[in-house]
Each structure stands twice: as C-alpha cells, then as structure tokens.
Image: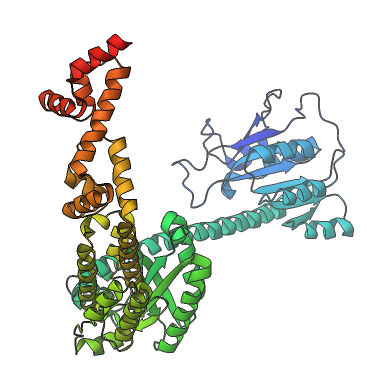
Amino acid sequence: MNAFPADANPAGTTIMVRGDGRSEASGIKKDSHANEVDRRNESDRNGPDTQSDTVPLSSSAFPAPYPALRTLIVDDDYFVVTALERKINWRSLNIEQVYTAHNVAQAREILQQHPVHILISDIEMPQGSGLELLAWIREMNYNVQAILLTNYADFNYAQKAIELQSFEYFLKPIEFDKLMLIIQKAVQRVKEQQSAQRAIQEGQYWQRNHSKMLEHFWRKLISDSSSSLIKPAVLAESIREQNLDYRLDDKVQPLLFHLFPHNGSMGSQEKGLFDFALQNVFYELFQQPSFSVDTMLEYKDDHWMAMLKWKGAPEQDLLRELCASFLQKARPYLKCEACCTIALPSQMEGVSLCIRQLLTMDSEMVQARNEIYDVQDYLELAREPAEYAAPDLAHWEELLNRNQPEVLLAETSRYLRGRLSHRMLNVSVLSLFRLDLVQLVYSFLKMKGIQAHKLYTGKTHEQLLAQSLNSIEDMEAFVQDLVTTAMEYRDFTERATSVVEEIKQHILSHYGDELSRNDLAEIVYLNPDYLARLFKKETGISLGSYVIQVRIAAAKQLLETTSLSVYAVANKVGYGNYSYFSKLFKQAVGCSPNEYKKEQQGSF
C-alpha cells in the first residue's frame, strides 16, 4: 500500500460537486486543511470550467426529482481516492457531495455526522477492513448501499460481503466504465428505496387525512340527518367535492353504541384514554373481510356510531355476533356496560333515512343494558304506539306506609321489566311512570311533614334524575335513591329526639345568624309548623323561646368576658335592633345590658 505524499492530508475530506459535474475537496475536521483536487483530466473530458462556485444539486439551478445523494469513498491508498474523485462524473449521478476517508475511524466519524447513501470502500486497510466498517454500518442500521473494492478474488471476502448485504463486490484494478455502471445501479437502488419510503409516508399521511375526511363527512351527515333527510343529489355532490370513494349504490349500515361507564372508571374520569381503548376494542372485533369500518365517532356524550361498508350482501347474523362479543368485552376491558342498535342496511343514496331512523329509535326507545336492538323491530312497534298503563299506585302507597320499601322496589322493577318485555315502554311512557312515582313519594313525605323539594337537592340526586330515562337500569337506580332517601329520612324524623338535637346544635353554633322558623325547618327538610310542634313537644318550650334563651346566655358570656360595647354584643348574638335586644335581656335577666356589664365589672 502506498504512503501518503508529503502534501497529502490523511484526514477525511468532503468533495463538493460543482455545477459542471466536477468535484472540489474541503476538510471536514478542524485540524485538517483543504485539498484541491487536480481537475486537469476532468477538464479535458468535460470542457472548460465555466462556473467557479459550487452549487448543490438541490438548488433551483439543478432541479432533481429525488433528494441529491451523498457518497463516501474509503481507501488507505491516496491515489485510489484521488482517481475516483477525478474519473467519476458525480453530478451526472445526482450526487451532491463526496466524502473521503483513509481509514475506518474517519469513515465512522463521517457516517455519524452526515447522511451517506453510497459507500465505496477498499476491503484491505491496515486500521480496520472495509468488511468491518460495513458490519458496523449494518449494526448502526444506516441505510447505505456498499460497493466493496479488493485486490484479491477471495471467496471468504465475497461470502462475507453477501452476508453484510453489500451492493457490489468489485475487483481492482478499477475499470472506471464498469464502476460507473455499478454506481449508477446503486443510485437507482437508493432512489427506489427513497421512492418506496416516500410512498409509505405519503400513504400514511393520506390514510390519516382520509380518515379525518371520512369522519367529517359522516359527522355532518349524522348531524344534518337528525333534522331533515339529505337528498341523494346533495349527497352525491358532497361525495364528489370531498373526493370520497363512495357510489350511491354502495351498501352501508350504521351501528349505534350507547355506553354506560361505571362510576370511578376510566370512562368517567379519563375520557381520552377511554376513547382510545374503546376504539381499539371495537376495531379489533370488527375487522372482517366482508365489510370495512369507514369511521367510528362519538356524536354525543357516550353515544358512538360506526359506519360499515359492505363488500357483498349484508350479514345480519354476523353483526349480531360481533355486537354480542363487543358487549361481552366492554365490562372487563372498558369497565362499562353498553347496548347496541343495528340499523337497517341501505344503499348509500338512502343512508340519511337510515341514520335518522337510528337516531329516532335511540331517543324514543327505552333500552336495557347489555342488549342488542334492531331498528326493524322499532319500525314495527312504531305502527302501534305504546300507551301508559299506570301501576297500582294505591298499593304502592300502602307499601310505603307499612314501611316495606324493599317490596316496593321489587314491584317497580317487575313493572318496568314487564312493560319492556312486552315492548310497551318508550321514553314518553317511562317519563309518565317517573312523574307518578315522584308524586307518590312526595305526597308520602308531605304527610310526614317533610319538605321533599328540599330533601332531594344535591348533585347525586340531580344526576340520577337526569340519567333516569337513559335505560331501565338508570330508572331503577333513580327509583332506588328516591324511595331509600324518603324512608331513611322518615325514620330520622320519627326519632323526634334526633331532629330536636340537630336543631339545638344548629342554634348553639349559629345564634348570631338569622334563625327564623322557616330557616330552621329547612335544615331538617320539615314543614315549619310541624317542626315547631315537634320541638315544643320534646322540649316543653317553643322554638322561638329557645332561640332567645341561647342568645341571651351568649350575650351574658360576652358582657362578662370581653370589652365589647353592649351594641356590639347585641349584633354578635343576632339582634340588629338594640332596643329590642335590651328589652329581651331585661325580661330574662332582670336588668339592662349596660347595668349587667357595670355590675360584672364592679364585682371584678
């Protein structure tokens, strides 16, 4: 192997390809100086140098359909590197930069700092072989086409080169015409890989964008169909404008999933994660060869619609099986329950009607959780609207009076389930049932002197009321809360001592506040007159007299232990009118507040 000439730079160099196809060298290390490559032979072949500045091929002067490429030449023989720099017309190969190195260490440094597409390397080098360099490249997962040069036709070299996926194995001495063809083939391979990668990226981008377009298309169609039917011509125009792959005779079928997340579950607390898990479960189950799922979207809280596009004839039994599998997995995997409604299959031109039927059924029909419903059944029932047949409310009132809430709850569930099984229950019927039951319980509480409208306040009850028409289970939960709360509070008020003690404690803690009879009755949700009678019966004094006793006792304590004025004390114990306070004080104590204060100070 030849030693470097005195003026040679042993460090790696970068060859910038000029506009005329020739190359220019520049150092890549801080401690290396640039080598100017001898261009005389190049000038003879390519003509006079008409452009002095280096121009990357990615500029507008040399537009290229692919990103310009970069090559690395590695050989410990300086003259081989120089010959390759001079003899190859790099510009014609769309190669923008040529890096050079004279050992494996320099080559690794270049590869770590710059993207390299094609490697031309000697195998036999004293500080590491080209095969070792290629093995490292494969280990680092660099996508490089490698052309290996060697002086020896060694079978082991060739075998190892094949194992390392070398692009070409080339024997010296170098025949530049053949090497040029090999490099051209390597360039073509790089372009093919770039094209494939670009297609993948564009395909992924198209897929993401296409999915969003489909979701937007169907979301708008669902929204518009809820108020009016979309004519086929309008639908066709929308499909054409958005360049969607639909024809008016395509067979489509919506599915609706109503979800009921468990309290404290991911669905009620971490919506984003729940939605992600939901779609994973759904797409895993509904990945079928007979149809595609074009989109799945949430069109209102906990209501999802999936759009299926059939490749052949719709298969209703298959859909019921898949929906049953989804309902089965929803509880363990999603910590929620659900019900599924299957729309009628339709051609694309009639899908607006199909969606509207589905939405109407969901809003009007009462459903049970973990069940599958068909729009076809709803359409048959719609011909004979369900009428409300009130339960035996007198018997239920008797159960309340006999303190049998468990029996009452069992009978309400039996009534609801029976109506549902006979398909005689819709939202309007259920709302009438709820109204009757609420009036029954409120009337029962009123007889007990309990103010029901005060008792049933709070977030929990309001939430149960709002959800009560969503499903049979939701109505049962509302009825359970309604009846249980009524009976528990009835038991509390019947323990008169408990009610009176609660009122006493409130007065002792809030004697400075407004303490009218109405205010105190609201605390225990009782009728004011009923509370007054109950208090007098238990204590022997009226409610108003007890309030005065507590306030005067508090006033005496303040006059004895503080330097507050008598006016300030009056305000402290709830009397804004000092004259009235003074009158009450004198009646209770036998002297005015001022006299009492002086007396206490004198005794001190």
Q: Relative to residue 424, is residue 205 depicted above or below?
A: above
Residue at the spot x=83%, y=50% of the render? Answer: 150
Residues 434 and 48: in front is 434
Q: Residue 152: x percent and y percent?
A: 88, 52
Quadrant position of the C terminus in the picture: top left
Residue at the spot x=29%, y=45% of the render? Answer: 503
Q: Relative to residue 11, is residue 84 depicted above or below?
A: below
Residue at the spot x=84%, y=45% of the render? Answer: 129
The residue most toward the front is 590
Q: Is residue 250 visible?
A: no
Choose top left, top right, bottom left or bottom right for residue 481. Answer: bottom left
Q: Which colour scheme is used?
A: rainbow
Query: Total marks drawn?
Result: 0
Q: Residue 140: x percent and y percent?
A: 71, 48
Residues 344 and 235: in front is 344
Q: Is residue 48 visible?
A: yes
Quadrant position of the N terminus in the picture: top right
Residue 567 lies left or right of residue 271; in this view the side is left
Q: Residue 574: x percent and y percent?
A: 20, 30
Q: Residue 216: x percent and y percent?
A: 31, 63
Residues 579 and 287: in front is 579
Residues 510 and 542: in front is 542
Q: Relative to residue 87, is residue 285 depicted above or below?
A: below
Residue 103 lies left or right of residue 67; in this view the side is right
Residue 68 lies left or right of residue 380; in this view the side is right
Q: Relative to residue 450, is residue 225 depicted above or below?
A: below
